[in-house]
Amino acid sequence: MFRRIVEIGKSIQLISQLVNQDKLRLQALECLRVLDLPDGYIAAGFVRNLVWDHLHNKNVSTPLNDIDVIYFDLNESHAEQYKDYQQALKVMMPEVNWQVRNQALMHSRNGDQPYQNSLDAMSYWPEKETAVAIRKLPSGELECIAAFGFESLFNLQLTHNPKREKAVFTQRVKAKGWLKQWPKLTITQ
């Protein structure tokens, strides 16, 4: 158990180091911090791609198609509030394609039981390595969470989440071109 805690700590430390070397990611995290969304994080490819780029010794980060912001607010006043948050982020950082979603509402779209928080919502995402998120705390420190831990992410694995249909996972792997972009990846069960 102690070894696992140490490994998690090392993973988070390396992610923080990588993010601190990336101006775009630092700026995006600051924008999210200013917005101060409840249980708000930047998730998915924001962290995943950065780790895979590092492990593939890429000198230049793979461009992000979008920046996925998740938050969890059961008391949100209207169902399309996320659009206001998305627009606010777009004003702060217009060169980015922001995608913002309240995870407290996503269970109904996905046919799941209600999620408990952002971390729980990520535990339903199609591939385990995508279920990682980060945010900047008011203290300036970075906080990184992962629904399935960090081991498979750092082992260059791509793992189907059994909470989702295998066909969805397979389609995403093909459509996203991950195996071409990061050829050291291996699909695991």
Image: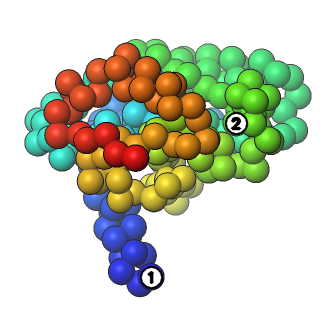
Which of the 4 image quarters holds residue 58? top left
User: From what the image shows, is residue 134 above or below residue 59?
Assistant: below
Q: Position of residue 163 (x, y in %)?
A: 61, 41
Q: Is residue 178 left or right of residue 160?
A: left
Question: Which residue lies at the image location 71% right of the left edge and 49% below the top edge?
Answer: 117
Q: Is residue 33 left or right of residue 63?
A: right
Question: Which residue lies at the image location 24% right of the left edge and 29% below the top edge?
Answer: 179
Indicate the amino acid at tag 1: Met
Q: Is residue 87 left or right of residue 172?
A: right
- Residue ranking furthest to the bottom: 2
Residue under label 2: 103
Which of the 4 image quarters holds residue 103? top right
User: From what the image shows, is residue 65 above or below residue 70?
Assistant: above
Circle 1/circle 2 CB separation < 8 Å: no
Indicate the amino acid at tag 2: Gln
Question: Which residue lies at the image location 36% right of the left edge and 80% below the top edge?
Answer: 3
Q: Position of residue 171 (x, y in %)?
A: 43, 20
Answer with mark 1 or mark 2, whichever residue precedes in sequence. 1
Q: CA distance from mark 1 to mark 2?
A: 30 Å
Q: Label 1's element?
A: loop
Q: Position of residue 174 (x, y in %)?
A: 34, 20
Residue 81 in view: yes
Which of the 4 image quarters holds residue 110? top right
Q: Label 2's element?
A: helix
Bin the neighbour count of mark 2 within 10 Å (Cα to Cα): few under 14, some 14-19, many 20 and up.
many
Residue under label 1: 1
Closer to the eye: label 1 or 2: 1
Which quadrant holds the N terminus? Answer: bottom left
